[in-house]
Image: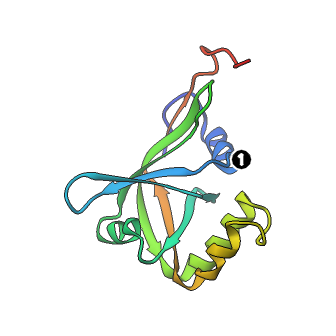
Amino acid sequence: MKPKGPWTGEKIDRFLRDTRVPLRIACNGSNGHPVLVSLWYVAIEGKLYCATQRSARIASLLSQDPRCAFELSIETPPYRGVRGQAIATVDPDLGERTLHMLIDRYLGDSTIPPAPLLLARVEHEVAIVIEPQTLVSWDFRGRMAEPG
């Protein structure tokens, strides 16, 4: 897939690997309205992995309709990020492993909150594996001054 926007595929991969803010994922709701959820993620070999409880609405909706969109962006000026359309798979076999990777990535320590709470329910975790079909980057650093 050829990405659109100012960044090369390599720069997009680096941004997805290095940025530690939640990913926003949107899917089709059962009532016809979009559903938007923010989740921790880890990027591995062109796919994005999230974890959530098996009973979460996002897991149920993606199981019914795997089409989704996602966005990962820096929310302070100068704005930049990546968005795209994707196909998502809900995988119960990867839930625990993905949760451990996310705790390591975002917290660095499984003993600090909220890690103990998350790990107490690990048997109910599923992975959401997001496989991008389109990628679009944007970067406003050239037209926005750094704050401060």
The quadrant in which residue 96 appears is bottom right
Is residue 91 left or right of 79 when viewed as pictured? Answer: left
The quadrant in which residue 8 appears is top right
Residue in the image at 58% along x and 56% along y: 46
Total count of labels: 1
Which residue is labeled 1 in the image? 18
Q: Residue at the bottom extreme?
A: 123
- Where does residue 71 sit, x and y in percent of width and height? 49, 44
The answer to whether residue 2 is above or below residue 44 is above
Could you tell me which secondary element the residue under label 1 belongs to?
helix
State whether residue 135 appears in this view: no
Residue in the image at 64% along x and 46% along y: 13
- Where does residue 45 sit, x and y in percent of width and height? 63, 59
Residue in the image at 70% along x and 19% along y: 146
- What amino acid is labelled 1 in the image? Asp
- Where does residue 76 sit, x and y in percent of width and height? 62, 30
Q: Nearer the viewer, residue 19 or 2?
A: 19
State whether residue 103 appears in this view: yes
- Crowding around mark 1 (Cα neighbors within 10 Å: few <14, some 14 to 19, many 20+) is few
Residue in the image at 74% along x and 17% along y: 148
